[in-house]
Amino acid sequence: MPPLSQDNTPGRVGPGAPEPLGVCPDARGVNVAVFSAHAETVSFCLFDPEGEREIAAIPLPARTGEVFHGHIGGIGPGARYGLRADGPRDPSCGHRFDPAKLLCDPFATRLDRPFRLHPSLFAASQADSAPAMPKAIVEAPLPALPQRPAFAWDGQAIYELAVRAFTMRHPGIPAPLRGTFAGLGHPAAVDYLRRLGIGAVELMPVAAWIDAPHMPALGLTDAWGYNPVAFLTPDPRLAPGGWAEVRAAVAALQAAGIAVLVDVVLNHSGEYDARGPTVSLRGLDNATYYRLDPGDLSQYRNDTGCFNTLALDRPACVRLALDALRAWVVRGGVDGFRFDLATVLGRRAGGFDPQAPLLAAIDQDPVLRRCARIAEPWDATGDGYRLGAFPSAWGEWNDRYRDTVRRFWRGDAGQLGELATRVAGSADIFAPRHRPVSRTVNFVAAHDGFTLADLVSYNTKHNEANGEANRDGNDTNWSWNHGVEGPSDDPAVRAGRAADVRALLATLLFSRGTPMLGMGDESGRSQGGNNNSYAQDNPVGWFDWSGADTGMRRFATRLLRLRQRCRVLSGDTPLRGSAADASGLPDVAWRRADGASMQAQDWNDPGNRTLVAALYAPPTAAAPAHRALLVLHAGATPIAVVLPAPRAGQRWRLLLDSAAPRRRGPCDERLPVAARSVVLAEEVPDTIR
């Protein structure tokens, strides 16, 4: 067989091998292996160096089981290609083969351009879709990365961000790098996160995606990336330098002590519903890759709310998902994943199973089991809400924490007992599976919903810019606006909102579990009341660095440092109220403001707006005992909280007051607490003033 040609023209074609899937170069050419249980032929289509002209369409000559394969000489790294599959075109039987559609190799690792919607991509068009399709690029394997330590669930804060939105307006990032991984890895971005005190970033989806079909007519583009097509490929808009650019940014963050997690969307693809574009899996083997409506195989099960659902209990889908996850670890160097609509990952024909094939495979994989696995524990179905049901090594987004904290600070009655459970680590949810409380990922705001600043500024969502007449987005936000909907010049309204944001941040960062901050929530970022900014790839959805509230940022940084310093705030066991050591002090004692222990009538009092927790951590070989008092007071008037008697040789000292961030110092027997505020005090040797 001849060696590689200089211009990537095809040479001798042989049977090749069925493994590995995808297009893999060697010294003589490329091995091509494509799964399809129902195709009759699969062709490898080679394009010119610009990816515009189809040079050759080579039917793969061999088939082993359900894999078509062949070896094509003369072709090497840099070649641009696509796939075509022919077979039955019978949607009533679940088959949608169309050789006029150029298809993206689902195992491709680089594309020459982003996906763009075009009429030729849709089934109604008989035109060749190749001119409108990105071409995959043959890539050689990257040098191996050193093995990273297993992800440390140590209670440090996660910071959720979108690569493009975070970097687009950052004045310290050179303009050509903004919106990309290179911008995220720039010292200006990394230093901001390091100084803030973040332990991990969670990147919103970064695999190559396509816009939803309704968006172009509205003049909108996808800002979030939750419509993936090529699961092993970083989107060219975010990583024009491909995997090398991703790897460099990840390494820069890790060198600063910041782990990198990626939000992955494996539950559906961007091929949408039966009228959507045919760009990859639909054209290769629709009946295998997708979960179809058993009563009408021309339609898709919509367990995701995104109009299709991948059949992740089938071997082909499990293989694709595992290879995609490993690519982000092996090629990109990331430390873990957040799984969008993760209930779908555990779905069998009969419903959710925490031991479903994909979940079990992830936990057994020698690469992936070292990574963080965080579930968004719900999907769009009536039985899809599965908070607490994922495997024991997994973390989960805790929306019950989110809603309880919001309702408490909004002023809803009857939240005190629920709030105590959430602040103490949500043992009712996570303890039955014997999980450390670090696995509850606590959050008050995330990409999906109001920002923290908007939560206290709007009673209702304002999503008109999304072009759906404000029908999209969640209607249940538990928000409050301080008497004015939206921006206000009233100093009292502005001060009240800022105080509430500080109280919300303090509640989040002083709770047991792993806290997650939304991008810009530490700096007062607003989206103008839009609680579903998926279509706002513009200043609405971007981090406005010039308008950042630097005082709020300093306050958030201080909270993060206190969390790291105070052991009682970030332990990995839930607070239970039992004796922590021979001192007899419990890990938590729930108290009334007058110093008495909480009784049933106090917990059930709908007018009670004050949670007082006396916290204690016993001594260890590395640290002395630590005792603190946390007060969450959502009442409208100030109170005085009676402090517990200090231990011998100790006295109480105020560490933080969310109502007066500069206030600190020694405490008397009664601790003044302002209306709607969070206060933290700690015991210190009485020699410290």
Image: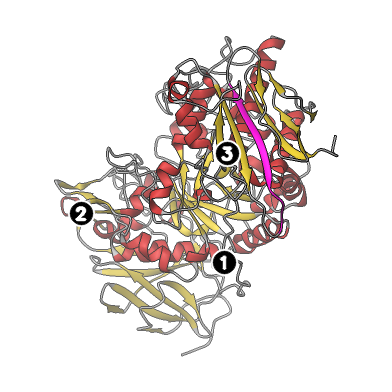
Q: Amino acid at mark 2?
A: Gly
Q: Quadrant of residue 657?
A: top right
Mark 1 sits on what residue?
331
The chosen color scheme is: secondary structure
Q: As displayed, is residue 449 above or below residue 27?
A: above
- Percent position of residue 180, x then y: 64, 50
Mark 3 sits on what residue?
511
Q: Name the residue rendered at 66%, 14% in the picture.
A: 638
Q: Amino acid at mark 3?
A: Ser
N-terminal of the pair, mark 2 or mark 3, is 2
Q: Which contiguous range is marked in magenta? A: 622-633
**Residue sitting nearer the eye, 116 or 576:** 576
Q: As displayed, is residue 511 above or below residue 670?
A: below
| Left-right relation of 226 to 18 | right
- Evaluate whether residue 548 shows in this view: no
N-terminal of the pair, mark 1 or mark 2, is 2
Q: Secondary structure at mark 2?
A: loop
Q: Quadrant of residue 88?
A: bottom left
Tell me the crowding category of disc 3: few under 14, some 14 to 19, or many 20 or more residues within 10 angstroms, Cα based: many
Mark 2 sits on what residue?
94
Q: Amino acid at mark 1?
A: Arg
